[in-house]
Image: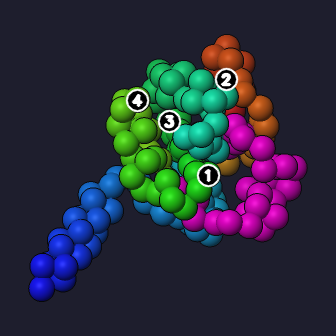
Amino acid sequence: MKKIILFLSVLIFSISIHAQSGIPSWKITSLEKFINTSDSVVVINFWATFCKPCIHELPYLQSVSEKLKDKKVTLLLVSLDLPEAFPLTIDSFAKANGYTAPIVWLNETNADYFCPKVDKAWSGAIPTTLFINRKKGYRKLVQDQMDQDTFEKELRKAL
């Protein structure tokens, strides 16, 4: 009986932690819908908690995007972490670093399937950032870590 109660307690605790996470799980179709229906300049950054170059650029991606928020800039951070990192590792990493930009976890395992749906030129490398302004017909993919000045220049081109 004690084992059943312990098991149920652990199960309920893990479900409640999972439900409390602010990190949604998206399939590539959800990301495509987000891209195709956005009415603002969209910056989508593909990153992972284990990627040092990704972690280095995230703070200024957020601060520059926030600075240009009045110009209708939306930053979306798309985590490509492994399934075992979802949602707790990603959520605790985001909270520990004070990230306020929306974060989603891309629940896909086949890069040959989802990468070309984002951009035909994407090799799957991270960090990768996609700049989109549907009103201008602007779309640019950067498959590398950017410094703050380069990021801001690329973002201003999208405006």
Which residue is the extreme one toward the front? 2
Q: Which callout, 4 or 3, points at the residue further toward the start of the chain?
A: 3
Total tally of numbered discs in the picture:
4
Q: Which callout, 3 or 2, points at the residue further toward the start of the chain?
A: 3
Please identify the quarter of the rendering in which residue 83 is found.
bottom right
78 is higher (above) or lower (below) than 4? above
Q: Nearer the viewer, mark 4 or mark 3?
A: 4
Q: CA distance from mark 3 to mark 1?
A: 25 Å
SS assignment at label 1: loop
The picture places residue 91, in percent across and down from the top left corner, at 39, 46
Q: CA distance from mark 4 to mark 2?
A: 20 Å
The picture places residue 151, in percent across and down from the top left corner, at 67, 23
Whether the magenta-drawn stretch holds residue 2 is answered as no
**Span highlighted in magenta in the image:** 105-133
Q: Which mark is residue 80?
A: 1
Residue at image coords 59%, 24%:
56
